[in-house]
Amino acid sequence: MAQSVWGYDSDNGPERWHENYPMAKGDKQSPIEINSKDVRHDSSLAPWHASYDPGAAKTILNNGRTCRVVFDDSFDRSVLRGGPLTGAYRLRQLHLHWGSSDDHGSEHVIDGVKYAAELHMVHWNPKHGNFAGALKQPDGVAVVGIFLKVGKTPKPEMKRILEEIDNIKTKGKEAPFQHFDPSILFPKSRDYWTYQGSFTTPPCEECITWILLREPIEVSPDQMAKLRSLSKNVCCPGFWGYNQACLASVCEDKKTYLAVIAAFAVFAMSCSCPLIFP
Ligand SMILES: [Zn+2]
C-alpha cells in the first residue's frame, strides 16, 4: 500500500492500514462491538454536557473520505465536559461514516446491529497544548458517536449538513458553513457507553475516550442517498467509508476485552442523577 493513499477499497482498506500505520494493530483499536450483556454500569460516571457556540462553525469540506464540518478551536469556545472526562475538551470537527446500503455503515456495532451511518464529533484536551500534542496522549481526545438509522421520522436538523453536500460533491471542495450549533444533532437521551479506544482512520492513534450515545437519530432514505452522492474524486459519484477490520478479523480477543471494560451511564435529560440501570 503506497504511503498516504489509505482508503476503504480492497487494496488500501482497513485490513491493510497496518502496513503503513503499525498502530492500526495496537491493543486499544476502535471500533468495537458493544455486547450489552458484557457491559457494566459504572455508578461513578457523570452526565456529559456540551456547550457549543454556533459562531465557532467555519467550513464544510469533502476530503475524499468523508464530509467534515470544521470549527474554530483556538480557545474554549465550544466544549464538551463531564461523563468520563476530566476538564473541558474543545470541539474541532465532526464527520460521518456510512455504508453502501442501509444495513451497514456504522463503525461501532451494538449487539450485532450495524446502523446506516455514524456521526463523530471530535474534541481535544487543551491541556496538551494543541491538537497534535493531544493525539499523543491517552486522555487527548474525546469523540461523541451518534448512530444514524433510516426511519419514518427523520431528524430535520440533519438537513443543514445535507443541503450543503451539493456544494462539496467532489474531493477537495470546501464551502462556508457558519452559524451552526451541532448539539441540535444529539438524540433526546443522553445515555452513553464509554471506553478507551482509538481513531478509526490512520494513523489510528490510541488517544480517544469514546462516548457512544445509545439512542440513534433517524434519517430518511433520501438523506442517506444524499450522503452516498458524495464523490471521492471528480469522476466517480458515490463513496462510503467505514472501518470494521478490527471487528472482522485480527482482534477478536481485544474486541471482547474492550467491550467488557466499556461502561455505560443512564441519565434523564433534565436530571443529573442516574435513574435506572439493569
Ligand atoms: Zn470517524
Image (spheres, rainbow, N blue to C red):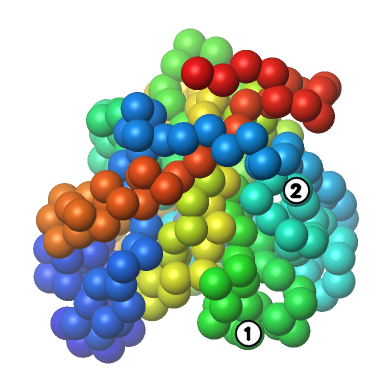
Answer yes or no: disc 2 within 8 Å of ligand 1.
no
Q: Which residue is mark 1?
A: 133
Which image quadrant for residue 254? bottom left
Name the residue nearer the viewer: 120 or 36.
36
The residue labelled by disc 2 is 82
Q: Residues within 10 Å of mark 1 (few under 14, many from 20)?
A: some
132 relative to 164, above or below: below
Asked if 16 appears above or below 33 in the picture, the reply is: below
Which callout, 2 or 1, points to the residue nearer the camera? 2
Number of disc labels: 2
Which residue is at the front of the view, 149 or 233? 149
- Identify the residue shown where x is 19% and y is 82%: 19
For label 2, count other residues whose C-alpha is less than 10 Å away and answer few (under 14), some (14-19) or many (20+).
Answer: some
Residue type at the position of mark 2: Gly
Using the rendered view, name the quadrant where residue 111 is placed.
Answer: top left
Q: Horizontal and vertical percent for residue 150?
A: 42, 23
Q: Quadrant of the N terminus?
A: bottom left
**Residue 256: percent from left, percent from top:** 27, 47
Q: Nearer the viewer, residue 240 or 214?
A: 214
Task: Name the residue at 61% across, 69% down.
Answer: 139
Is 184 above or below relative to 30? Answer: above
CB of mark 1 near ligand 1 (< 8 Å): no
Q: Where is residue 31 shown, x and y percent of the image?
A: 36, 53
Residue that appears at 74% across and 84% down: 129
